[in-house]
Image (cartoon, grey):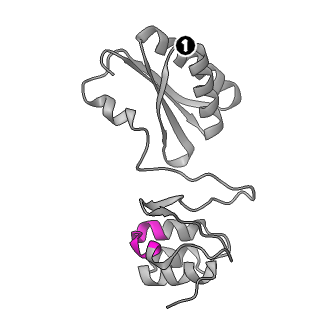
Amino acid sequence: MDNKALGIIETFGLTPAVECADTALKTADVELTGCHYAKNGLVAIYLAGDVSSVTAAVEGGRAAGARIGQVAGYTVIARIARGLDTVFAQGDKKSERTPKNSSGSVNPPARTDESGPVLIAKGNGGASRDALEKMPVAMLRTLARQMDGLSLTRGEIRLARKKELIETINRFSGIEEK
């Protein structure tokens, strides 16, 4: 991103963010370098290009996003500092959010590690015990909270140990214990 400008548009919700990105990319010759899903529904999109293109894209995207939702903030940085581009060029890897399915409940994370997908749904065989054991306790708790109809309450999930979480998730998804 040498001598490129960075444009950021932050919205409340994914739909206005997608509208912002679509309009911004159609407005000027810019590239979408990342998307960050923050807590409480904040979504930030990152645009790169020359200063005038990024300025036009951010203005167009901001206006489009404001028509259908709420824009929390926006900025254009004319020449970003060296090294800062690597932070935004990679997108958002730490706080990937999972989409909601057709029933409105949140799907579990698509991957726990590089070994492959983990699919957990009641009665479908779910994830392997090995895949669950590789997951950190915090991720298991997040996964358990996302599973509709799990036998643990939110308070019990918060205090549960790893073994209990794995056993409960396996029972929920129909996996036989060893």
Q: For the magenta stretch, what is the residue range?
A: 131-140
Q: Which one is nearer the viewer's eye here, 70 or 137?
A: 137
Residue 138 part of the magenta-drawn span: yes
Residue placed at 55% from the left, 71% from the top? 144
Residue 90 part of the magenta-drawn span: no
- As displayed, is residue 1 above or below residue 108? above
- As displayed, is residue 36 above or below residue 165? above
- As displayed, is residue 153 above or below residue 89? below
Report the residue that reaches farthest toward the right.
Answer: 103
Q: In the image, residue 12 lies at what x, y percent? A: 59, 38
Quadrant in the rendering for residue 148? bottom right
Q: Is residue 31 left or right of residue 67?
A: left
Report the residue that reaches farthest toward the left.
Answer: 82
Q: In the image, residue 132 lies at what x, y percent? A: 46, 74
Q: Which one is nearer the viewer's eye here, 73 or 173?
A: 173
- Our reading of the magenta stretch's main secondary structure is helix
Q: Amino acid at mark 1?
A: Ala
Residue placed at 59% from the left, 33% from the top? 17
- What element does badge 1 sit on? loop
Q: In the image, residue 72 lies at what x, y percent? A: 54, 31
Q: Is residue 161 visible?
A: no
Q: In the image, residue 13 lies at what x, y percent? A: 61, 40
Q: Which residue is mark 1?
A: 28
